[in-house]
Amino acid sequence: MNKKIVLVMLSALIFTGISAQQLADIAMRTGDNSSSGVPAGSSAPAAVRVEVKYTLDAYGSMSSSSTAFEEEHFLGGETTAKWSLFQERYKRVYDQAVGLTGSTVEIIKPTLFNAVNKINGYYKKALKKGEVSKAEVSNILNHILDCANLLSLEDDTKNIENDIKAAKSVDDMVRVFASVRIVKH
């Protein structure tokens, strides 16, 4: 039922000529340093406290994916849906008729894609070693995936990408994502 409603709304929006930015109903304001620390109502990880540097507005569900096949995530549940949406938004697969390979994969915003994959691998190993709890990893990764999924729809992500490139460790990358406040409407 929800998919039918979304499809009807999408087709109506497409026919009216609304841009991709308006279609997603998401806006990013950079340089919003109005509060220090992570606000109480946000979805930022509790384990990581930093000054809010970026604000993303989200309208609707952030974990709904239109893929026919969900790629299983090691945390399962809600994270699997967000992970599948992340993979869908950042990977573009093009079939090739010429050459040895059957398809070409293009990565959209490779800095963000590689950072999320690196953080995911880091926490997967840390969880196996028992260095962190599953609840803590789930909280951190769900926030990072929410940020990445929203950022995939943004046109101007140069500032956050530069912060990620400047990060010297995985913990620094996590701090960059923790500096993003998601306001759900």
Image: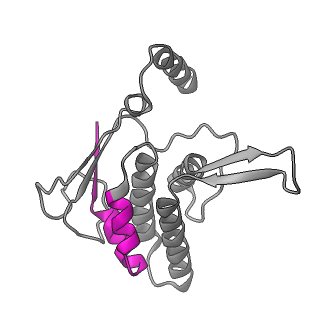
Please give left or right for residue 55 compared with residue 160 in the image.
left
Choose top left, top right, bottom left or bottom right for residue 183. Answer: top left
Does 11 sit above or below residue 102?
above
> Does the magenta run of residues contain 120?
no
Residue appearing at x 44%, y 42% in the figure = 153
Q: Whole-percent x and y of residue 144?
A: 41, 60
Q: Whole-percent x and y of residue 94?
A: 73, 45
Please give left or right for residue 138 compared with residue 40 in the image.
right
Residue appearing at x 44%, y 54% in the figure = 148
| Secondary structure mostly taken by the magenta-highlighted segment of the chain | helix
Residue appearing at x 69%, y 39% in the figure = 68
**Colouring used for the render:** one colour
Please give left or right for residue 57 compared with residue 60 in the image.
left
Q: Which residues are the magenta region?
A: 159-185
Q: Whole-percent x and y of residue 39?
A: 18, 56
Does 117 sit above or below residue 13?
below
Q: Whole-percent x and y of residue 134?
A: 47, 71
> Does the magenta run of residues contain 166?
yes
